[in-house]
Amino acid sequence: MRFIVCALLLFLNTSLSATVKVGEIPPQIVGITLGGEQVNLANYRGKVVILTYWATWCPYCLKEMPILANIQQKLKDYPFQIIAVNFKEDRKIFRDVARKTKKYGMVMAWDRKGKYGDAYEVTGLPFLVIINKDGTIASKYRGYGEKTLGKIINRLNELLTPG
């Protein structure tokens, strides 16, 4: 009996800490909208998705938001969507930012306790994942800076170019 319990604990520990890798389909629920609905990546199949976890205490996250809003506006006629998930902050903070950014067309979501971000191993912010049209992870960026922005744009161009 002791062997079974140890084996079960080992299995649970390994499966819960498994890293979501490039080329794999990630966890589908990434956060909750202001209206309380789950944001499900399955609803965005056929689109390239930028999934970004951010917080207001993260200076680069705050720099990133207008850039992402601009990208969303420029790519509004393409199969593309940005989902920005506020990570581990109060609802009031999320609500205020979500209302201010609504006009940009980004999907704003909230992950109060880190439940959804933990599935992606969000341990540093900003944390960005690019998801292919087929729903698999194309690229992951953790704690990146301005120097990485060119790589992200190039990757988006690759994924959005037909062929």
Image: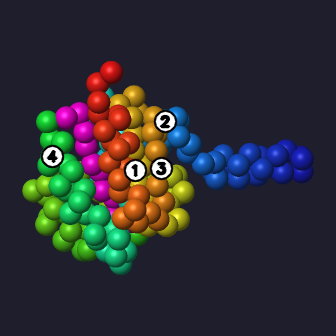
CA gap, disc 1 and disc 2: 22 Å
Q: Earlier in the sequence, mark 2 or mark 3?
A: 2
Q: Is residue 79 magenta?
A: yes
Three-letter code for the amino acid on which mark 4 is drawn? Lys
Question: Mark 1 near mark 2, Cβ–Cβ under 8 Å?
Answer: no
Residue for point 51% across, 52% down: 120
Q: Across the whole image, how many numbered discs are drawn on residues? A: 4
Residue for point 35% across, 44% down: 154
**The magenta stretch spans which residues?**
78-87
Q: Residue tagged by mark 4?
A: 74
Is 7 on the left-hand or right-hand side of 89? Answer: right
The quarter of the displayed image where residue 58 is located: bottom left
Q: Residue tagged by mark 2?
A: 25
Q: Mark 4 against mark 1, which lies toward the viewer?
A: 1
Tag of residue 140? 3
Tag of residue 3? none
Closer-to-camera residue (117/56): 56
Q: Residue tagged by mark 1?
A: 151
Q: Earlier in the sequence, mark 4 or mark 2?
A: 2
